[in-house]
Amino acid sequence: MSHFTRVKTQFRDLDLVVKALEDLGYAGKVERHGSPVALEGWGGTKRRGEVVVRKHDLSPAYSDLGFERQSNGDVAMWADSDFVSRNPRFATSLTQRYAYHATLSSLTGQGFSVAEETSERGEIRLVLRRFS
């Protein structure tokens, strides 16, 4: 039976979660809300999320995918248990894309710019430079 599963993440920035989801092919399918909205789950199960991908945009899924800020500042991911089990690389890919955007955000904020970017065999290599 399908149900919501809380997937532990180390995400802290919902805007970066949106960018990561868009990188994974959910551009135009991600809803960003200022406060948590209801997620629809299988059998009427309810959770809440500030970033949402509706179940009709996921395959296979019986529940919406949602991200909600917790009281400690971390972001929890609520996902359909069947979606998680049938897409074991989803959380890994999402985490990689989140880390990519977090790294770029932090380093460009410190004055660095991307000089080179390569990707092979699932690894991303960034060469950054900063002129003083």
Image (tube, rainbow, N blue to C red):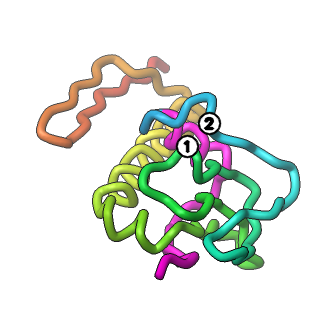
Q: Residue under label 1, please give it.
A: 57
Label 1 sits on what residue type? Asp
Image-quadrant location for residue 95: bottom left
Viewer-nearest of labels 2 and 1? 1
Mark with earlier residue (2, 1): 2
Residue 115 x/y as whole percent: 33, 17
Residue 20 falls inside the magenta stretch:
yes
The magenta stretch is 1-22
Q: Give the camera-side residue of 86 and 105.
A: 86
Residue at image point 61% right, 71% down = 42
Q: Secondary structure at mark 2?
A: loop
Q: How many marks?
A: 2
Q: Position of residue 56 (x, y in %)?
A: 58, 46
Whether 110 is among the magenta residues is no
Above or below: residue 36 compared with residue 99: below
Q: Nearer the viewer, residue 57 or 129?
A: 57
Q: Is the C-beta separation of discs 2 and 1 under 8 Å?
A: yes
Estimate how packed mark 1 is, as few (under 14), some (14 to 19) or many (20 or more) residues with alpha carbons within 10 Å: few
Q: Which residue is mark 2?
A: 29
